[in-house]
Amino acid sequence: MEERTRAYLRGRFSDHYRRVEPSLPPGADEREWGYIPWTAGPGTTMVRHNSLLDLGDLGDFLHRERPRHVYFSAGRYADPGAGSMDDKEWQRSDLVFDLDADHLPGVEPEADSYAEMLAACKDELLDLLDLLERDFGFEDMTVVFSGGRGYHVHVRDAGVQHLDRDQRREVVDYVRAADLDFDALVETETVAGIGLKNPTEKRTLPTDGGWGRRVHAHLEAFVDDLLAMGEDDALERLQEFDGIGSGKATGALTAAENNRREIAAGNVDVHPAFYQLAKILAEEVFAEQTAAVDEPVTTDTHRLIRLPGSLHGGSALAVTRISRDELDQFDPLVDAVPETFVGHDVTVELDEPVTVELRGETFTLPADNVSVPEYVANFLMARGRAEKGKE
């Protein structure tokens, strides 16, 4: 990035912070604060080990220093401005989750557009929130668009504040369904009956919560759909699964027809083919309902995380807090575009053609000096795709 580009973005970030002041997180004066300035060269310099007292009034600091990135800690400390983590004296930490579009299964950063990657990340976010709300019962959560490639979720329920790294890793393992398989999920009990010389075993899915409830719900919905079909369609549907031929399909369908009440109670041992079907459907649940969160972020009780309301120096988009009610309609490429950068055009220099989607429009730009809306220009300059042109 050339100096004139840095100077322009520094100035416009300052103008933005003159108009918009980010809100403070709970317990702001107990947290460590850090930021990255607009320094020259390929590397970045993190300025950290600051307390809010060191920075002064947040609005004044942001307007004066116009940092490229701004962070606060998930942890709270007795002395947040101390120069070492031990001297800070950790008290407690929020539970923070980070979803990064670059790291999601099925996303190809070299092939997918920025809009497509963010859409996939939002789907992953909805899965994560469903897990945190339904399975853990968390209520005090803040959802944030990171301004870059994904989303953050800050959980501040009292029950999570004192979790250590290992306990936080267990939460991550649950959310990712790490090392979870169907056989380990199933509960086995010995059943003895009148007239039986040898006791038998009954395998049952737990239905009262957790992944057992999720797999059972998916299994029941599949069985309901299956029984609503004609026999030929149902058998054809079952044979779409690997390892289930005509004989197993017939056995699984007959078991579903004759044991609906048992299946509703969680019994998956009504027929060997039905057990195999349940196992296949469980893998679908593990693939579709997990969330690929970044483990080091969640397990790190000292992690610095982006400040909602600040600007992301790699995109010039706003780090945006999103209410749960607004999440379905939230479009980061529209709603996170700062109003400060809307309303006039600037010139940028492009070395190669580029396509940008912002504010509901698609801009296809040639390799040339081009005049574009400032929010497009700032986005391209922040991402290293353009330099500031001469007006």
Image: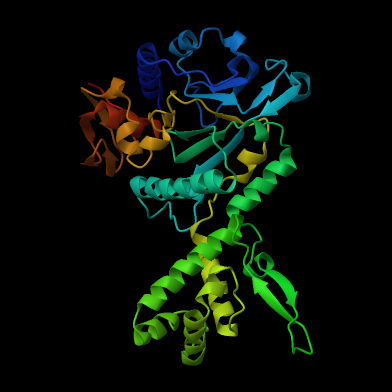
Residue 139 x, y percent position in the rendering: 54, 35
Residue 50 x, y percent position in the rendering: 63, 16
Residue 389 x, y percent position in the rendering: 27, 26
Total numbered labels: 0
- On the picture, is 328 further left or further right than 288? left
Q: Quadrant of residue 43?
A: top right
Q: Quadrant of the N terminus?
A: top left
- On the picture, is 89 further left or further right than 249? right
What residue is shown at x 32% (from left), y 40% (from top)?
329
Q: Is residue 182 above or below residue 325?
A: below
Q: Quadrant of the C terminus?
A: top left
For residue 15, say whether it is visible.
yes
For residue 286, say whether it is visible.
no
Q: Is residue 247 above or below residue 89?
A: below
Residue lying at the far front of the rendered structure? 194
Q: Nearer the viewer, residue 138 or 266?
A: 266
- On the picture, is 269 further left or further right than 105? right
- On the picture, is 290 further left or further right than 20? right
Residue lying at the far bottom of the rendered structure? 247
What residue is shown at x 40% (from left), y 18% (from top)?
10
What residue is shown at x 54% (from left), y 59% (from top)?
214
Coloration of the structure image: rainbow
Q: Nearer the viewer, residue 43 or 105?
A: 105
Q: Is residue 178 above or below residue 258?
A: above
Residue 150 x, y percent position in the rendering: 46, 41
Q: Nearer the viewer, residue 190 or 56?
A: 190
What residue is shown at x 53% (from left), y 69% (from top)?
264
